Image (cartoon, rainbow, N blue to C red):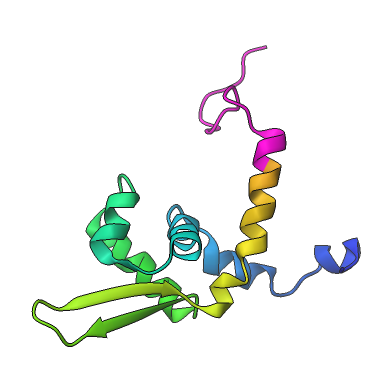
Amino acid sequence: MPTRKEMASCDGFERIVSMIAGKWKLWILRILIFSGTKRFNELRRELKGITQTMLTSQLRALEADGLITREVFAEVPPRVEYSATPKALALEKFFAEMHKWAVSNVTEDTKVTTKKKAKG
């Protein structure tokens, strides 16, 4: 395990954050890692509130970063499926740790936005 000093000065951290940050990327990865291969509209149905344009953009970025694959089948009508790559599947432990942290630290009373100022 890296030392605290090594963790604090990780040169790749900025790159990692750019690969998985954003409103939708972690949600997309979570679905593909834990639920398996999905078609575009299946993802769109599971991601409440995402637009078609945003989903397309996020999928392209994840594909460019090597976290998902896009497979086009020569069928009529065309079929396209998205899957997590081994690189993305390696994030399973990251998601498990996030889950453990949430169970220990997030309650129904936990605020999910910082827009409102706390009273006190």
Question: Residue at horizontal 77%, vertical 70%?
Answer: 10
Quadrant placement of the C terminus = top right
Estimate the x, y position of residue 25 in percent, counting from the top left. 46, 60
Estimate the x, y position of residue 64 in percent, counting from the top left. 43, 80
User: Is residue 74 inside the magenta stretch?
Assistant: no
Estimate the x, y position of residue 52 in percent, counting from the top left. 23, 59
Question: Residue at horizontal 65%, vertical 50%?
Answer: 98
Rendering quarter of residue 15: bottom right
Q: Work out which residue is located at the far bottom of the displayed protein and give it.
A: 74
Query: What's the magenta region?
Result: 102-120
- The answer to which of 6 and 92 lies nearer the viewer is 92
Q: Main secondary structure of the magenta part?
A: loop
Q: Work out which residue is located at the far top of the displayed protein and give it.
A: 120
Q: Is residue 23 above or below residue 25?
A: above
Relative to 69, 1 lies left or right: right
Q: Is residue 65 above or below residue 112?
A: below
Q: Is residue 67 above or below residue 115?
A: below
Q: Is residue 87 above or below residue 74?
A: above
Question: Residue at horizontal 32%, vertical 45%?
Answer: 48
User: Is residue 107 inside the magenta stretch?
Assistant: yes
Question: Residue at horizontal 14%, vertical 78%?
Answer: 78
Q: How many marks?
A: 0
